Structure formats: structure tokens, C-alpha cells
Amino acid sequence: MDDIEIDEVATPELDDPVLIEGLPGVGHVGKLAAEHLLEEFDGELVRRVYTTEFPPQVSVDGDGVASLTCAEFHAVETDGADLLVLTGDHQAGSNEGHYTLTTTFLDIAEEFGADRAYALGGVPTGELVEEYTVLGAVSDGDLVDGLKDAGVEFRPDEPAGGIVGVSGLVLGLGGRRGVDAACLMGETSGYLVDPKSARAVLEVLEAVLDFEVDYESLEDRAEEMEEVVGKIREMQDGPAVPDDDLRYIG
């Protein structure tokens, strides 16, 4: 196969859609948030993106049918905005691949008329979180005030080490091509999958895009994590996680 191949599954008419990126990263926060949107709003699959930058593997469904790993775009209609939701199980395996793949993602978003983007992810704290704060970064300073009104915090030099992966490049490459892009990062321990952080990020997205979503399934997942959290609390007196291990990847 070619380095990148795109399956055009459907091309619905969308009204000024907003790109929502939720690929795997710290705490799987962005991926959980994006998948929750797809579950609650019955998104329509519109594109599959295959690349040799993904691991050489397939996923196998309940019937034993294998599918080559890929990233997917889904069209989602909400009361407040049309969304183009990007998610998948992997990110690129090389620096060059991150640039090439993010460029492809932005090209697809442009085809659908998206000129705004929100990259969703988590920022690690190295300790269990009691109150979930969402940190922000933007491609243009004019976007800051609106996000602050929605409860997003902007802190000097955070996240430490910057934002790498697709989330960072959505801001960097997107900003260079005129996309108003923001990264919403829910604080998370970095130890485990974090549905509560995913909810905090989605609540910000609800406020800025003016839609409502039910959280019952995320709450169920959060309850499932409580036993794990209890065990981690018992370990908190152990060795601290080195700062170098806490750089945000999303």
C-alpha cells in the first residue's frame, strides 16, 4: 500500500463544521471524549485514513473479522454545531509521520469546510486529581478570552515540554494555514485511563460550541476506575514520577 491511503466512505453536507481531534494520549482523555461524542450523537463514518506509520496490526471484531488499523473521521450533528470528529487507536511512529499525517487530517477537514479545530487530550500531574482543571493552548491569542470564559486555564510554561503529536501539530500546522485551533487538556494523573478528565474537557467543549451531551456512560466508566484509583492512593507515598516522564503527548 501507499504511505497514506484514504477511503472516502461518505460526503455529507455539513454546516461550518468544527474539527474535533481525539487520538490516544495521556490518560486516553482525548480519545475517550471523542468516542463519547460518537456514541451519544450517532456519528456517520465519512473517511478512513490508513498509513504505514501505524503499527503493523489489525483489529479483530467479535465475529473474528480483522480490519487494518486506521484513523477515522465521523460527521456529527449537534444542536449547536456540526462536528467532524477524528479518532483512532494509534498515532504516527515517527516525527516525519506526525507531520505528514496531520497535514492529511487538516486537508480532509478543509475538504469539509472546517476552519476551526479543537484538539482534545490530557496533561499529566503525576498525582491523583480531585478537581479537574482544563488547560488550554491556542494557535492565535484572540482565542484565549473565549476559552477563559468557558473555564479554561492558561498557565505560563504549561504543559511542561510543550504539546507533541497530532494535538500539537493541529495548532502549529493548522495555525499556519489559517485554522483557528485550540488544544483542551484535562488534568489527569497520567497513571490510568481517566473518564472524569474526559468529561471535564467535554464540558468545556459544550460551553464553547453550545451543545449538550449526556454523561451517563462516562460516569459508569469512572465508577469502574474507582477500585484502581484506590490502589493508586495506597502507592502515593512511593517514588515520585520523574519530570521527564510527564511531558504531554496527545
Image (cartoon, rainbow, N blue to C red):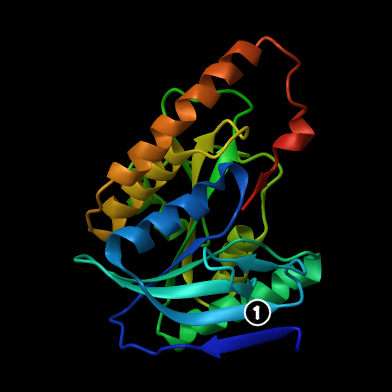
Give how far across and how far down residue 244 sits, in percent. 78, 35
The residue closer to the viewer here, 133 or 139, is 133
The residue closer to the viewer here, 67 or 174, is 67
- Secondary structure of residue under mark 1: strand
Residue at 27% in and 51% down:
207
Does residue 216 appear left or right of residue 138 in this picture?
Answer: left
The residue closer to the viewer here, 106 or 152, is 106
Q: Mark 1 points at which residue?
A: 50
Residue at 55% in and 70% down:
175
Which residue is at the far left?
A: 79
Q: What amino acid type is highlighted by mark number 1?
A: Tyr
Give how far across and how far down residue 246 sits, in percent. 70, 36
Classify residue 41 by image quadrant: bottom left
As displayed, is residue 222 above or below residue 241? Answer: below
- Number of numbered markers: 1
Classify residue 161 by image quadrant: top right
Does residue 209 appear left or right of residue 32 in this picture?
Answer: left
Residue at 47% in and 57% down:
141
| Residue 206 visible to an observer of this rendering | yes
Q: Residues within 10 Å of mark 1 (few under 14, many from 20)?
A: many
Give how far across and how far down residue 201 sits, in percent. 41, 46
Does residue 212 appear left or right of residue 93 in this picture?
Answer: left
Q: In which quarter of the image is the N terminus?
A: bottom right
As displayed, is residue 13 above or below residue 221? Answer: below
